[in-house]
Amino acid sequence: MISQKAKYALRALSALARGDRAQPRQISEIATSQNIPKKFLEQILLDLKREGIVRSLRGKQGGYLLLKPAAEITFGEVLRIIDGPLAPLPCLSITAYRRCDDCDGELSCEIRHVFHRVAEAERAVLFSSTIADGIHLADEAMAEAPRPAETVDG
């Protein structure tokens, strides 16, 4: 399960991606439109800025912009920045590997073998799915959703 912080980060990036790439968006505008607590969003955007995902512009017309196109920012990259390693077990982590404390041997661990398959499938989806993909999928779902029937007076 991803953290609330990661969900907020993905929603903030989607909000930035939906806007004009040359027009900075203010934190208060993103917070309101995405229903994200402003102070929490400030910290999230600082984390994303530190990792080169967004940049900030100061001043009255300032705000945040994506540093790279939404089609180049993957869900996996954002989740790893915000939540840390993606692996379900420490012995499967690519970025923070450590042997499990109670392990007799990774080759004979039934749990590790199954969760290795889970981790590989998860990484394949998360690191091939971009912010742009998420926006496209949401827009498609909205376009296909049934519309409420119009009422006729009379």
Image (cartoon, rainbow, N blue to C red):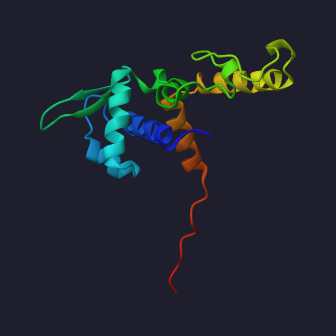
Q: Can residue 77 be seen in this view?
A: yes
Tally of marks = 0
Residue 137 horizontal/vertical position (percent): 57, 38
Relative side of 139 to 45, left or right: right
Identify the residue at image location x=69%, y=26%. 89
Relative side of 128 to 105, left or right: left
Residue at far left of view: 60
> Which of the 4 quarters of the picture holds residue 52?
top left
In this rendered view, identify the residue nearer to me: 146 or 49. 49
Residue 18 horizontal/vertical position (percent): 39, 37
Identify the residue at image location x=67%, y=27%. 122
Identify the residue at image location x=28%, y=32%. 64
In this rendered view, identify the residue nearer to me: 20 or 127. 127
Residue 55 horizontal/vertical position (percent): 29, 25
Relative side of 53 to 56, left or right: right
Quarter of the image where the N terminus is located? top right
Residue 15 horizontal/vertical position (percent): 39, 40
Relative side of 99 to 38, left or right: right
Q: Is residue 67 visible?
A: no
In this rendered view, identify the residue nearer to me: 55 or 90. 90
- Residue 54 to residue 95: above or below: below
Identify the residue at image location x=38%, y=27%. 48
> Which of the 4 quarters of the picture holds residue 24?
top left
